[in-house]
Image (spheres, rainbow, N blue to C red):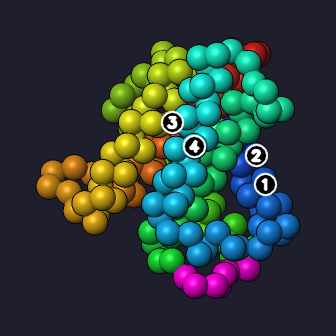
Amino acid sequence: MDKTLQQFDTVISECLALFTKKAKDYGTAWRILRVPSLTDQILIKAQRIRTLQQVGHSKVDEGIRPELVGIINYAAMALVQLERGVVDAPDLSAAQAAEHVQHWMHEARDLMTRKNHDYGEAWRSMRVSSLVDLILMKLLRIKQIEDNQGATLVSEGIDANFLDILNYAVFAMIQMEQEQG
């Protein structure tokens, strides 16, 4: 488990570093985005990964890894929006936004630790393509919950699905690193 925590932290540090740099470049304009807009952004990235996996090459000079980083950051941003609500104008500094995003990345890490205890790191036997499929499935679930105005009868809420998406994307990045290493 120590290896997993170290690998998880390495991935999260990379994602948070990029988020922080972009927050300095762009500010926190994303705070105006409604959660369904963030869901759609993640969906676009996940669908692109699936297309790249199926066709085997890219015509745009970005591969799967940057898309996974984007999924992780957008999922954390969606969790911030769920917690803080959508605003009409940016209301956080870049540093404040990074703190909120980091908080949710740590929440995802804590969830991963608990689930790994129960599942015995089963994700390590999974293919990256399967992890991407799970991300897509979670996104479709989120979209259905959003269409139901957030109501569920017996299922986890939107926040739990975003936490799972964040973790699946981290796992995919770790698996890709293992395959290259």
For label 3, the residue is 168
Q: Is residue 100 visible?
A: yes
User: As drawn, which residue projects farthest toward the left?
Assistant: 153
Disc on the earlier residue, 3 or 4 = 4
Q: Nearer the viewer, residue 56 or 71?
A: 56
For label 1, the residue is 17
Drawn side of residue 130 relative to residue 15, left or right? left
Tell me the CA gap for discs 1 and 4.
22 Å
Q: Are marks 1 and 2 in contact (CB under 8 Å)?
A: yes
Q: Are marks 3 and 2 in contact (CB under 8 Å)?
A: no
Disc on the earlier residue, 1 or 3 = 1
Circle 3 SS class: helix
**Residue 79: where, in percent of width, then height?**
49, 62
Tell me the CA gap for discs 1 and 2.
5 Å
Drawn side of residue 62 relative to residue 72, left or right? right
Is 88 covered by the magenta stretch? yes
x 76%, y 46%: residue: 14
Q: Quadrant of residue 74?
A: bottom right
Amino acid, disc 1: Ala
Disc on the earlier residue, 1 or 4 = 1
Q: Are marks 4 and 2 in contact (CB under 8 Å)?
A: no
For label 4, the residue is 44
Q: Circle 3: is it few (<14), some (14-19), or many (20+) Cα within 10 Å?
A: many
Q: Are marks 1 and 3 in contact (CB under 8 Å)?
A: no
Amino acid, disc 3: Tyr
Circle 2 SS class: helix
Tell me the CA gap for discs 3 and 4.
16 Å
Amino acid, disc 4: Ile
Amino acid, disc 2: Glu
Tell me the CA gap for discs 3 and 2.
16 Å
Q: Nearer the viewer, residue 96 or 106?
A: 96
Disc on the earlier residue, 3 or 2 = 2
